[in-house]
Amino acid sequence: MDDSTEAQMVTEPPSPRVPIFNLPGVILASLGLLAAIYAVQLFVLSDQAVEWMFFNFGFIPLRYVTPLSQQGPQLFWTPVSYSLLHGDLEHLLFNGLWLMAFGAPVARRIGTARYLIFWLLSAIASAALHAALNWGAPTLLIGASGVVSGLMGAACRFAFPPERRMPLPAHLNRRLSIGEAFRSRTVVMFMLFWFVGNILIAVGVPLIGDSAQPIAWDAHIGGFLFGFFLFALFDRKPPEMPPTLETSDILQS
């Protein structure tokens, strides 16, 4: 071995390890919390205890037409706590996959604190539209899909690469105005497919196998509209681009 080869071996830095799941910590924590709650529900609690948990932490529109004197404190926390509960493993896995796909770029862009506030408010927005369209109904709403839909709506404002431009990491893209989003072919097509899918669910067309539980399409829409139209309230200036991603290079065709 000559001196130049030995010097090269000494000075070359080791190759960085690429993590299997390159997700923000708050997304991993969200997934872990949802999985832990479902594991307790599945392996620890009895059927009666699960029913108690759903009643006390799930969202029920009927609560809001019952006199306050007959209500308990569940009135105040259930518009958020329902988003942490799931009816079965398929429900949990489906929401978890979409949370990884759309929650990761949003969390990278707005940070942990704003992501947590976004979760709380998008859950409330989802529950509010569900309650408005099912006023006084004794239905039980559970699941994170309203929040996930909110994250999808937020991602539509920045995560899709502009046409005819080299894509940046999603969280570094410029935020589109509402008008610009509606002029983006990619965003419009995504929103079209998303809304058509939920309309099909609303009229009773099953999209993913045969589900014994009805899907709260209205909560999905409430979350999506919240995320799409109000994302600017949570957004912050994107991180600076790495030195290797010069703007002059990115805009070249």
Image (tube, grey):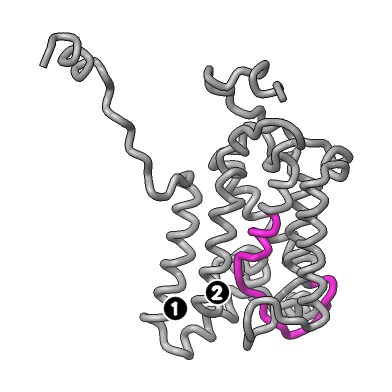
Assign a secondary structure to mark 2.
Answer: loop
Q: Amino acid at mark 1?
A: Gln
Q: Could you tell whether 234 is left or right of 180 in the image?
A: left
Q: Nearer the viewer, mark 1 or mark 2?
A: 2
Instruction: Look at the numbered discs 1 and 2 and tell me whether their residues touch, using CB distance below 8 Å.
Output: yes
* Residue located 67% across and 74% down the image: 59
Is residue 191 or residue 119 the one in the foreground?
191
Q: Residue tagged by mark 1?
A: 41
Q: Which mark is residue 8?
A: none
Q: Is residue 239 above or below residue 112?
A: above
- In x, y percent, where is residue 48? 48, 90
CA–CA distance in space, label 1 to label 2: 9 Å
- Residue positioned most to the front: 1
Answer above or below: position of 188 versus 86: above
Which residue position holds label 2?
86
Kindly identify the residue that appears in the image at 70 percent across and 38 percent down.
161
- Left or right position of 88 against 193: left
Q: Residue furthest left?
A: 1
The crowd level at tag 2 (other Cα within 10 Å; few <14, some 14-19, many 20+) is many
Image point (66%, 23%), residue name: 250
Which of pointers 1 and 2 lies earlier in the amino acid sequence? 1
Taking the image as shown, residue 98 lies to the left or right of residue 176, namely left
- Residues shaded magenta: 131-150
Give the position of the N terminus as an image quadrant. top left
Residue 139 lies within the magenta run:
yes
Q: Could you tell me which quadrant the C terminus lies in? A: top right
x and y percent of residue 102 in the render? 61, 51
10 Å neighbourhood of mark 1: few (<14), some, or many (≥20)?
Answer: many
Secondary element at tag 1: helix
Q: Look at label 2 and name its amino acid.
A: His
Which quadrant of the figure has residue 111?
top right
